[in-house]
Each structure stands twice: as structure tokens, then as C-alpha cells.
Image (tube, rainbow, N blue to C red):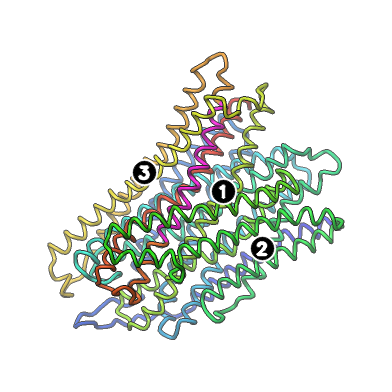
Amino acid sequence: MFKILLCTCFAISFIFPLIHAYFYYLSVRKIEVSNDSRVVGGVKLQSMKEIADAIKTAAYAYLKKQYAYVAAVTIIGAILMSFIFNSWVISGFLLGSFLSGLCGVIGMHIAVISNVRTAQEAKKGISNAFNIALKAGKATGFLVGGISMMCVSSCFFMMIYGIDFKFILDLLLGLSFGASIVSVFARLGGGIFTKAADVGADLVGKIEKNIPEDDPRNPAVIADNVGDNVGDCAGTSADLFETYIVGFMAVLYIMKNLFSYDQAGNELILFYPFLVAMTCNLGCYLAITSVAKMKRSPFYSLACILMRSAAFSFAINLLFLHAIRVDFYDSLILSIPFAMGIFATFALVLITNYYTSSNCSPVKSIAKSSESGHAMNIITGLSVSMRSCFGIIVSIVVAIFVSYFFLGLQGVGISVVSMLGMISAIVALDAYGPITDNAGGIAEMSGQDSEVRKRTDELDALGNTTKALTKGYAVGSTALAAIIILYTYIQDVVDMSSLSKDIFRLDNVFVVSGLLIGGALAYWYSSFSMRSVALVGESVVEEVRYQFDNNPGIMTGESKPDYSRTVNMLTVKSINSMFAPIAAVFSVIALFFIACFFIDYNHRFANGFAGMGGLITGVTLVGIMLAISMTNGGGAWDNAKKYIEEGNHGGKGSDAHKAAVTGDTVGDPYKDTAGPALNPMIKMVNIIAILIVKIIFG
């Protein structure tokens, strides 16, 4: 009976959020969108509905083309893997690819139907607009959290009903690899698209033509709004689903290596990660549904979701421990690592908010330095981005130390799962950002009153911070999981071969070489990402200039720019550009492993696996620092520009504003392309290392 009740709780933890996501979606969709056109300066502008339809059509055209390539890569990968791995790994790989893509597609669909409705409601007031964006964010959060929990619950059902634990781990390994492949493409391709469009639109529109952001005369403005959907919505949803699955897989691997499932007394510690995931999802569900509308301010409302998610999750976890009759001392020992995962999440949120919010001194310092010119804006922004790493890393280390002190490596694993368990709340906060950003763009393009744009700008400024904290959350959970993934890799090598752990000592030249190559790989991958944005952005600049030069009527409002031409060009170039960084990663891993393998043929296994251990450590360590620095720095640059546009330091059109636009242009690929794309790349490299062990030793 108890087993049935427990399975019912697990089923509720993902079924209820998914059902509620659908009802939130219906609630947003029923808002009627105005099809009335406005005349501004003697020029008739498109209606909000017409603009939204253009964004939606272009977004789906991009996604259709991107996922056609991703599907081909997935099918080819599955065929090749079928010669090496068992059916559990292959099934997991295909399922992980499908679910990651599904999260991306549905997340983007929710965004494209809600951004125009947020703009529509902004006519009535800021609370109306916020409530629509919040509902859409909740729908996306429940979607990603529900699908993630569905995967975990399925593994739990298989475990308690007698499926071999080894097969469950194989399924999760394949699931993680499939989700990682799709996530890398979604993050990278979408990031290149959105930032190339944004950079190209800003450089020609704001700086050269001195027209406002999201001005409908700009040929790249529709592409810019499309990019927010395919990059920040589809990319983030796929990325965070992958983050959850990979982190949970790593925790189960460490439990498998530390404990035997068949050994008496180990049932609780093996079962507990599943319980943590379930209670966190239930806690987030109750917290998100409890915040029905804006209270006091947008920031306060979003903060309530996060704080209540933590409190409810912790309380429900204690109740379940009591229900399964865990004594007080054991409950305390298990609850401390649980609390450390929540602590790490809050530390990330608070530190990210400090470095990216326009109400705090780092952003204000960037805005102030803009009065001294473009170079000073860049220098100060880089300083802020670098400084933001330290506090986040310290908080992660504190969580690791405390969890390890009380429960060893399994304690670190529990803290990872509790941190990942906040995914529904974090995704809800993240999805709010690009929705409000696009709402402002639609309001501007359709010529709405300045008061409407002022409301959407206020919501968007907070959205920049929520987007930054989501990226920090993804990277932070990767950092927490890194020690577990490394241990898993080392333990697999030792268990499947006759090699000793001593090969992974830091005085081993192959380990040190791997550290250096891994760290350099993170930089090399980021350089490809940034360069791709620059190259595609240059094409956008040329395209926008071409349309302005060859059609003077665009600036006077006598004719309309060719939006579709810009979108089509961007789609092709951004998708073509995303293959080079991914190919670089696979090439470096293969060449380095082969080099280590054959330098001393008599010790080829030891050298190869020692080198790979160093490589995954190096790419994780350096990649995390880079990702945190880039995402926080880009968010700070963006909000410094918005702070000036509010009327500070000379306001719009001033020299300080022009310098801030330059800083924001540099920060765009930092925060929305290179930084976020590092997170799935880091996990993909770690999973590849584990797969190599399985390939060689079976």
C-alpha cells in the first residue's frame, strides 16, 4: 500500500504541473489582441497582431530548419551508437533528444503567443502586463519541470518494480547525452541568431541612423524579436531540461559507486535523491500557484515565488522523511545537504542580482564610466564581469564543503538534486525575461503610447536580471555536479579496468596536460561562438545598410523594410555557423585522447584516461568561470544602458548613452551566446568521457 501511495505522489509531482501549464497557456491565449493600426508621424504602422504573426512565422521557420539538422545528427548518432551500446542507452539517447527539443519548441510557442498579449495588457497598466508575462513564465516553468520530473519518476518506477539499476543508469546516460546534443545546438544556434540580429540592428539603427531600439524602420527589428524567442526561450528550456537530467544522472552514478542496491541498509540513501526531486517539484508547484498576480512590485512577486519554493520544498521533504519513519538524527543529516542546495541557489540569485540590477552599484558604476567614453565603459564592464565570479564560486564551495562534511560525496549529490529541484521556479522567472523584452519591441513597432513602452521597459529591466540568474543557476548547478561527474568518471575507469586511482594524481604529466587542454578548449569554443556572432552580425549590418541606402523611403516612412529578407539570411548563416564550435570540441577530445593513448603504447590506457580526467576537469573549471563572467557582465552592460535611458547621465542620445550602447553590443554575445553555450558544452564533454570508458571497457 505504501509503495502505491509513494508512486501516486511521484505521479502527482509531474502530472499536476503539466496540467496546470496547459491551463496557464489557455489563460494567456484567450486574451484578445488588437488588430488596429496606428498612424505615427503621418505613417501607418503595422498592428500588434500583424507584428506578432510575423515574429511567430519567422521563429517557426528558423526552428524548423534548425531541428531538421538536429534530427539528422540525432538519427546518425543513434545508428552509430547502436554498434557500441545496448538498447537502453540508445533508447535514452533518442528520448533525451526528443524531450529536449520538445521543451524548446513548446517553450518558444508559449513565448510567441504571450509577448504580444503582454504588450496588449500593458495598455491597461503595469500589473496587467506583468500578470500575463508571469502566467506565461509559469506555464514554461511547469512544462520544463514537469517533463524533467516525468523522466525521474519513470526511473523511480522502474527501480522499485525490479528493473536492474544498471539498466536505469544506462537509460539516464543515453538520456543525458541526447539532451546535451540538442541543448548545445539550441543554445548555440539560437544564441548566434539572436545576438547577430541584435548587434546588427543596434549598430546601424541606434548609432548610425540615430533611431530608437525596436524602431519599425529598422530591417533587422523583426529578426531581433525572433531571436529572443529562439535563443532565450527555446534555447533556455532545452538547456535547463538537459541540466536537470545530467545532474540527476551524475548523482545516481555516485550512489551506485558508493553503495550496493542489494546491500541491506542502503535503500534510503539510494532512494533519497528521488525523494528530493519529487518534494522539490511539489514545493515549486505549490509556490508558483500561490503567487497569482503582482504583489507590491514585479521584483517582490518573483522573489515570493523563489522564497516560497524553497520553504515549501524543505517543509515537504521533512514531512516525507517523517512519513517513512526516518529518525530525527538521520533526518537532520539528510536535510543539511538538501538545505545547502537551496542555499547555493539563493546565493546565486542574490549575487547575480547585485551585479546585474540597475539598482545596485556595479551597474551604476558602468553607467557612470560611460560619461568618460566607450573605452571606459568596456573596461568597467569587464571589471564587473570578472569580479562577479568570486562570490558565486565561494557560495558553491561552501555548499560542497558543508554537504561533504555531513554526508560525504552523497551529501554533495543531495545538494545537487535539491538545487536542480528548483527548476520550475527558475524557468518561470527566466521565461518572464524574453517575453517582456519582446512585448516592449512590439509596443515600439506598433507605435503605442510612450506610457506603454515605459511599462514594458520597467518589466524588461527586471527580465534582464532574471535571465542572468537563470544562466548563473545552470552554470552553478554544473559546478556543484562537476565533482560528482569527475568522481564518476574516475570510479568507472577503476572499476572497469585494472588501473589505479594513482594515475589521476596532479604530478602525472598527462593529467596536467589534460587540464591545460581542457581550459584552452573552453576559451577556444567561446572564441568560435563570439566570432560566429561577429561574422553573422556583419552580414546583418551590411543587409540593414543596403536596405537603407537602396530604399530611402524606409527612413521617411514612405515604404516598409523587407523584414523577411533579413530573417531568411540570418537563419541560414546562424545555423551554418553553429557546427564549427561543436566540431572543434569533438576534434580536440578525439585528437588529445589518441595522442595520450599512443605516446607510451605500453601504458596507453593509463595515459589516455588520465589525460581525459584532466581534460574534463580543466574544461569544467575554466568553462564555469568564463560562463559566470560572461553572463553577469553582459547583463550588467545591458542594464547600464537601460539605466542611462531612464534619464541618468544625460539620458538617451547623450555621449554616455552612445558609449553604453557600445558596451551593451559587446555584452550581448557575452550573455546570450558564448556564456550560455558553455554550460551544455561542459556537460557534453563530461558525458563523452564517461561514454569513452564504456566504449573501451564495455
**Residue 281, position as x, y percentages in the image:** 66, 61
Label count reads 3
User: What residue is disc 3 on?
Assistant: 527
**Residue 639, position as x, y percentages in the image:** 40, 67
User: What residue is disc 1 on?
Assistant: 478
User: What residue is disc 2 on?
Assistant: 15
Residue 634 picture quarter: bottom left
Q: Which residues are magenta?
A: 609-635
**Residue 515, position as x, y percentages in the image:** 50, 33
Q: Nearer the viewer, residue 452 or 157?
A: 452
Name the residue at 60% across, 59% down: 345
Residue 8 picture quarter: bottom right
Q: Residue furthest bottom?
A: 124
Q: Tag 3: residue type?
A: Ser
Q: Which mark is residue 301?
A: none
Q: Residues within 10 Å of mark 2 (few under 14, many from 20)?
A: some
SS at mark 3 in the image: helix
SS at mark 2 in the image: helix
User: Quadrant location of the N terminus?
Assistant: bottom right
Name the front one of labels 3 and 2: 3
Work out how far the residue at label 3 is from the one at label 2, CA to CA, in angstroms.
Answer: 42 Å
Work out how far the residue at label 1 is from the one at label 2, CA to CA, in angstroms.
Answer: 27 Å
**485 lies above or below 368:** above
Q: Earlier in the sequence, mark 3 or mark 2?
A: 2
